[in-house]
Amino acid sequence: MKITKQYDTKDCGLHVLQYLIQKINNEYVEIENLKLMAQYGEQGISLANLANIGDRFGLKLDSYEVEFEKIITFKNDELPFVALVDNKGSAHYLVVEKITNSSIYVQDSSTGKKSKLSFEKFKQIYAGICSFVYKSTRKINSKLEKIENKIKSYFVPTKNDIWLILISLISIILCFSTSFFVKIVFDNILPNKMHKALVITFVAFIWLNIIRFISSLIKNIIVEKIANKIEFNLKSIVFEKLLKLQSDQKSKLTNIEILKRIGYIRLISEYKANFIYSFSTDLITIILSCSMLIWISLKLFLIISTICLIASGLNLLFKLYFEKSYTKQIESSHDYAQKEFDSIYCLESFNNSLDKNYLELVRNNSFVNFRKQDFSLKKNKYLNDFVVDCILANLTQIIVFTGTLLFYKNEISIGTIVMILTISNFFVSPTLSLSAIIMTKNIIDKHVNMINFLLNIDHKEFDNQGIKLSKIDSIQLNNIEFGYEHSKPIFKKLNMLIDKNTRLVGENGSGKSTLLKLLNLRFYNFSGKLFFNNNACEIIDKNYLLNNSILLNNQIYMPNDTINNFLTSQNIEKTKTLYENLEKFKLNEILENLNLNLSTTMTNNASNLSSGQRQFVILLKLFTQKFHLIMLDEAFENLENSVYKKLKKAINNYQDSALFIEISHNAKIISNAAEVKIEKTN
């Protein structure tokens, strides 16, 4: 038994837990099930969170600080245990299974296999913490339902699939019909020198081929349309899900991991679009060709089928090898893509040779690792293709040789031999194609599961039901508890009343920015009560609240678009309001002084703008509509004092009925706000 290999960078703890549950309790649990229960911090999943999840499956995990010298004295009855190690600067978990006089044997999810480490090597990476695992008599939840396959609905037969099946039948009939051309010519027309019949037969079969190619063209167009439709639908539901995810739930995946999953959608779409046609065509073709070959010559059929089975077997062995190496290949591919992004994004960061050379060294190492994986796969593929081609390339010679011997015995005619040569292609190619379709399904299933996980992450659904607040006079927080990880709470019994414009103050990391996100309903897992105007959050119209609230900070991503579209989303009413306010408050003058206009196109997260220009553009959002709640997180830090003062006056004038909650380290705030020290309320 060995540990499974992790797909995502933060999931080593889940693979360790999956391994221990199966080893100790003899119960297999899907990683996606564990992932849905996990809470992710910056370094992944904490030991405390792993212990909480393990408790649901009858495992008890107790963690202690243990010196290395003590570890090497452990007896077999104290194994296995989980060791926290440093993996290139990131926290990583290993399952220690065996300790000898000089080595430690571990299960490592980063490689998906058992590894042997010397004492010296283990000591270098050991982080000083062990978690001991025991079988517990308590089991909170022993049975989990299988994750719903939310993509399944897109795999039901459609009207287009019926057309594809009809086209496949027409293509098959036409293909087999053209194979009779050589038999008719060699067995009937040539011996009797039927010139006119030759011309008629030639023209007739040319037209049959033209019709076959037309049907193939129609098939390709239909398949492409089906693939595009599936891709559109899948991407729509994926992005709809992403838009609804709260920040703490989204942290289960990094942006690169989300992009990786989205990248698989086209592969899934093309597989589904081609599946109905390819599967039905190949299967029917194999059945018909088998029947015809057996009817014509059982001996030749046995020879052809044996050679075909050998070729398919070799392809199967390669597919098994490919599937085993596929995860590692994908991982190295995405790592290289990330390193290329890093190199490009850091071009303007530093201008000294040390930093530039380091980034280039990291990129080169990643490229070499990626190409090594890629070359290893391709080398084996080329070797497999070489052997298969050698076998299949000699099939014609074998058929001719065997057929000639049978011709000498008057068992078959020359026309029949030529016909068998043609029909053999209709047997060999579909057999190899069908086996490839079946073997590829395992990889497609993995991609489907990865997208299904994304679609099954919990989120809070906000509807348009409840009280619509026309103004926000007060916000009450009662016993709020929240943390990205339960073991590291940011808020612990937070109690606060905000009934006037407020400035939050506190040490870095005290939770000021997190509080603004919580008030903007960006978190899923928090406890306590949140009230707006003495109304519990549960009974108000949250969509209406969010549409009339705004949180501005420096983390806002600015897409490649014009400033006008970024500010108004091409909404006519917002565009009109913005232009009126620009004129009314003379903000056009500031735009002009900053060398900006609304038609300016921003690129690469507005990297073509200065920090002051960028911040000013973001603040113009406050002039597109009247807001009930405005939250500003260091929103003026990069602005010149003259610009700040003009904006302050304009914002106070226009947003005169809004409740302001602000964070600022240099006292650049909008209103005469009451200071609240967050540490005193938490």
Image (tube, rainbow, N blue to C red):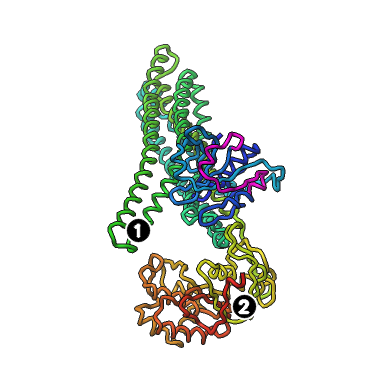
In this rendering, the count of numbered labels is 2
Tell me what residue is drawn at x 52 percent, y 35 percent. 99
Label whose residue precedes the other's in the sequence (1 or 2): 1
Tell me what residue is drawn at x 37 percent, y 72 percent. 609
Give residue 370's position: percent from left, percent from top.
38, 44
Q: Using the rendered view, name the quadrant where residue 311 is placed.
A: top left
SS under mark 2: strand
Q: Nearer the viewer, residue 515 or 650?
A: 515
Tell me what residue is drawn at x 62 percent, y 46 percent. 61
Give residue 469's position: percent from left, percent from top.
65, 77
- Quadrant of the image containing the N terminus: top right
What amino acid is at disc 1? Ile
Residue 370, visible in the rendered structure: yes
Q: Using the rendered view, name the quadrant where residue 356 is placed.
A: bottom left
SS under mark 1: helix
Which mark, by number, is residue 134? none
Give residue 11's position: percent from left, percent from top.
53, 48
Horizontally, residue 182 falls left or right of residue 669, namely left
Q: Residue beneath label 2, please?
A: 498
Horizontally, residue 210 falls left or right of residue 483, namely left
Q: Nearer the viewer, residue 487 or 225?
A: 487
Give residue 574's position: percent from left, percent from top.
50, 78
- Quadrant of the image containing the C terminus: bottom right
Residue 169, visible in the rendered structure: no
Q: Nearer the viewer, residue 507 or 371?
A: 507
- The magenta stretch spans residue 355: no
The magenta region covers 53-78
Q: Residue beneath label 1, please?
A: 344
Query: Badge 2, how many Cα within 10 Å: few under 14, some, many 20+?
Result: some
What amino acid is at disc 2? Ile
Q: CA distance from mark 1 to mark 2?
A: 44 Å
